[in-house]
Amino acid sequence: MALQCSRTCRQYLLHLAHDNIDFRLPEIKALLSIQGKPFDPSENFKEKSPFLRLNGLSEDNIRNIMGRTVCAKSAFELWGHGKTTDELKSSLLKYPSERMLPFLQEESTYKINVYTFNKTLVFQDRIKKIDALNFLPFKGKVNLKDPDHIFCLLEDYGTDPNNIPEEPFYRYFGRWIADGQRDLIRSHSVKKRHFIGNTSMDAGLSFIMANHARVKEHDLVYDPFVGTGSLLVACCQFGAYVCGTDIDYNTIHGAGKSSRTNQKWRGPDENIRANLRQYGTERQYVDVLISDASKSIWRREALFDAIITDPPYGIRESTRRTGSHKDIIKPPEDFCGESHVPVSMEYRLSDIFSDLLNFAAHHLVMGGRLVYWLPIYRPEYCEEMIPLHPCLSLISNCEQVFSTHTSRRLITMEKTKEPAVCVCALNVFLCVCLSSVCVCVFPCSAHV
């Protein structure tokens, strides 16, 4: 019991990347919830700080987080911290020696790195800071190329590049445990992608969305506005099986004009499957279909572990659904064929999100997550504008700013209860509405 406590009662430090700042904590919280662990930061927690101290975790928990996160650069077992050099030294001397000694043995090799946030130090200053740690009982040999253990002194000089202090606001020292998955952003860059479109999602944001949705191995993930499949690529990286739909025939079949410069038409092998093949995840590809998101093709039951999507906003990609503005002429009673050939018509944003939330409420498994983008006009934005559904709980709401007036918000929702069941009688159409969202409209014969 004492050994277990010593492993789980340690404090760990995450060094967070200083981009997509609004998305970092929801990603860490989601990755902790996959492991059934609460988010327990230190009492001096600051949301915008690049350094995050976590309590109540084991080293395995930290390694699992770092094996998924694209918002954190590195993780450390925190041995000491303080505002001044003296406070740091005092904190390090209080750290239990039995936790240090396994990494300070004579037969081991080590190196010490110095990282400064928002300030660049010359080599001589770095050496001085390392020499000031000579009170620590290091017995091994220094090996800068391939050490057994890596230690790091991290200094925080604030976030204002125009007002950098002489001395850091805070200092940390710890043992390096693992790096995050920032390399995925480069290896899966859209610039290197085999098949792209005008609105292919940035690789970093795709992985963030997959993490917010808690996508796991063997999950079934669905994208109702799949486009060129960027979100499917990210979900496959974490072991999920993927499928999707889109109303655009040319995109689904990889036909038509190319989005690349100096290329007029798409090649015969440019498609979503080719993207997954490029990253060695083709076996996790279920399929994609041409379908209208406003007219569900799926049987009415919980099918998906996560729904992740970037709906069209009508800016670079039009918002369309099948239907016609023409008057519908009633066919003769003895007519057995189709009375009308659907064409494209406007699909209002409010209808898109209403349909999306209703679909998620009916087709997500309990505890499954819906993650989607919501366009915002910033001067008029308020939290009441976020679409809600009685069966879905709002988990996080993160902003990506485009300009002073425009942005989009990444909305994460979790299914917490099943929709109300329609009560059918006498072959009458029945609509059960909860709050302001209509959760089902179709004939009672569908429930028999």
Image: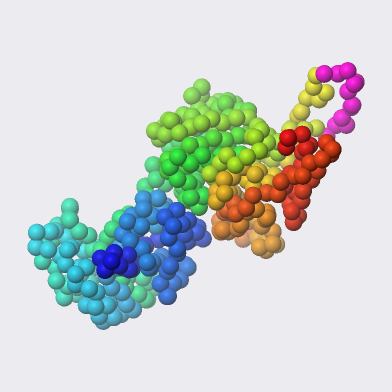
Question: Residue at coordinates 21% horizontally, 63% vertically from top-left?
Answer: 112
* Closest to the observer, 393 or 15: 393
Q: Nearer the viewer, residue 229 or 116?
A: 229
| Residue at 43% over, 42% down | 217
Q: How is the image coloured?
A: rainbow
* Residue 244 in which image quadrant: top right
Nearer-the-camera pick, 170 or 95: 95
- The C terminus - image quarter: top right
Give the quarter of the figure containing the N terminus.
bottom left
- How many callouts does the rendering have? 0
Left/right of residue 240 with respect to residue 410 in the rendered view: left
- Residue 155: x and y in percent read 32, 70
The x, y position of residue 152, in whole percent, is 26, 64
The answer to whether 162 is drawn above or below residue 308 in the figure is: below
Q: Is residue 291 left or right of residue 168?
A: right
Q: Is residue 350 visible?
A: no
For the question of whether residue 135 can be seen, the reply is yes
Stretch in magenta: 325-336
In percent of width and height, residue 401 lies at 57, 57
**Picture coordinates of residue 337, whole percent (x, y):** 80, 19
Give the residue drawn at x 32%, y 68%. 9
- 213 or 160: which is nearer to us? 213
Q: Is residue 330 inside the magenta stretch?
A: yes
Apparent side of residue 427 relative to residue 72 in the rendered image (left or right): right
In the image, residue 339 above or below residue 376 = above
**Residue sitting at x 44%, y 31%:** 282
Relative to residue 397, is residue 19 drawn left or right?
left
Give yes or no for residue 130 being in the magenta stretch. no
Question: Magenta-highlighted stretch: main secondary structure?
Answer: loop
